[in-house]
Amino acid sequence: MFYQVYVRSFADGSGDGVGDLAGIRAHLPDLVALGVDALWITPFFPSPMADHGYDVADPRDVEPVFGDLAEFDALLADAHAQGLKVTIDLVPNHTSDQHRWFQEALASAPGSPARARYLFRDGRGPDGSEPPNNWPSVFGGPTWTRVPDGQWYLHIFAPEQPDLDFTNPEVVADLEETLHFWLRRGVDGFRIDVAHGMAKPAGLPDMVRVEDTGLFADDGPGDLRFDQDGVHAIHRRVRAVLDQYEDRMAVGEVWVFDDERLARYLRPDELHLAFNFKLLTADWDADVLRTAIEHSLLAVADVPAPACWVLSNHDRPRHVTRYGGGELGTRRARAAALLQLALPGVAYVYNGDELGMPDVDLPDEVLQDPIWERSVHTERGRDACRIPVPWSGDSPAYGFSTTPDTWLPMPDGWGPLTAQAQAADPDSMLSLYRTALALRRSSAAFGGEDVQWLPAAEGCLAFRRPGGLVCVVNLSSAPVPLPEGEVLLASEPVTDGALPVDAAVWLQG
Ligand code: GLC
């Protein structure tokens, strides 16, 4: 059970309105009380913040806004003392344009070793004034930016995130050094950013144009930016480093939807885990969810990795909002939590999921995600799902910070959403998560990896785990009779022998 800490938005210890390592450290007891096993902390390395930390200027240090190395060591020691493992983000695909290497590349001539760490190419057309190929950037616009001497460099994301050339041994060696740096400090593992990126096809050929509908929407066969066979050699190098230490792991952000292609990342000498984004992208529909679950399980059927379930993260609309928002979205999110946590394998909870945080509509002038500018104000980007977490009190910043002036504004009226308010309410989302996680951790009903689908009413999902857990989710438009068995937990009251609409129940079958 992993908990994703989006560092800017989890808790602010310094009072500048931006979350930081001290804030995480102060809230470790809350995460223990929630019942998670491990944290994933998003990038806290020195960064000009063109993509809020995913543009890393030095992968072996701490951004002053977030703290320093001593603060990180203290956080790690405290977490370990409280029984929590700590994993951190690794961003191998690209650096910041402020990274020493990229600055050196800009100051060096075409063809120089400094340029060979990145993907600099001459342009096409008259005077090389057209980009070297037709790839679109994930954040909008072309994937190439021209430098004053006329060459172009490749950036799958923002221009401030130049892609590294992984055919250059120096680049791989530096990644290994970064791994050792954090492993020696004692981190338990890594979440690998864009783990399906890194390798590019030789010659960087044009691709058959895919409609550029936004973040990652077009990955798939034919998208030459991602899932190239050469990426597996890089994962083997990473794994070889991890295996030099005891009990360390890596989870990949692998936006690959084909089961067999995804499974390749999970071979015994590659990643330990790969996020399965099928739940994150599935609508609230029984058939869609069942298909998502079946494929996620199939993908890991022949590899040593367990399935890895994600409902929300910092890149996608939160599931309360995806499922309809308001009371409806919250009710469905409660049911979805029981569905996610009933499945075998690993689950990731994104900070605020446990409070049922929704997305927040922000006014144009506070939007910060590079997608907003890059898409020429056609895509609002991901700020809506990155609002700071409300901890306590009745007005912004709700205990997140001592200043109400938080990096993204927090709305009025969130008093009832705070962790403090919810901890006191046995019917709250937070209480549901705490109970569910305690059961998942302690009950033998959750034993065994198989999912046996049970006959279910139209629009419902029902399955049994070998340990005896039965999970039923009602996505139909009418209540359905409860199957036999002792009720362990329900997302809505089930006193009259029926499972209400948009509700889920755990039974001891
Ligand atoms: C990953 C991160 C996302 C970031 C991108 C570029 O998808 O999750 O937040 O913008 O990589 O590093």
Image: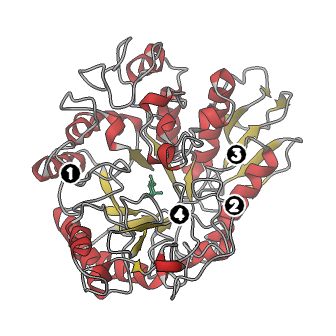
Image location (x, y in percent) of residue 51: 38, 50
Q: Residue 241 lies in what quarter of the image? A: bottom left
Residue with the most extreme left position: 70
Residue under circle 4?
142
Q: Quadrant of the C terminus?
A: top right
Question: Tag 2 or tag 3, which sits nearer the N-term?
Answer: 2
* Label 1 close to label 4 by CB (< 8 Å): no
Q: Nearer the viewer, mark 4 or mark 3?
A: 4
Task: Name the residue nearer the viewer: 498 or 13.
Answer: 13
Residue 211's tag is 2
As measured in the structure, the alpha-carbon distance from the residue carrying label 2 to the one carrying label 1 is: 43 Å
Q: Which of pointers 2 and 4 indicates the residue nearer the eye?
A: 4
Which kind of residue does numbered mark 3 sit on? Val
**Which of the two discs, 2 and 4, labels the residue nearer the N terminus?**
4
Q: Residues within 10 Å of mark 3 (few under 14, many from 20)?
A: many
Amino acid type at image mark 2: Glu
Task: Check disc 1 and give the amino acid type.
Answer: Leu
Name the residue nearer the viewer: 493 or 130: 130
Look at mark 3 in the image and give the residue it sits on. 470
Q: Label 1 to label 4, Cα distance in Å?
A: 40 Å
What secondary structure is marked by label 1? helix
Q: Secondary structure at mark 4?
A: loop
User: Could you say which disc has been placed on residue 76 in the image?
Assistant: 1
Residue at position x 31%, y 54% from top?
A: 85
In the picture, the disc for residue 124 is none
Kindly indicate the quadrant of the structure image that contains residue 93. Answer: bottom left
Name the kind of residue labelled 4 in the image.
Pro
The residue located at (57%, 70%) in the rendering is 135
Ligand 1 lies in quarter? bottom left
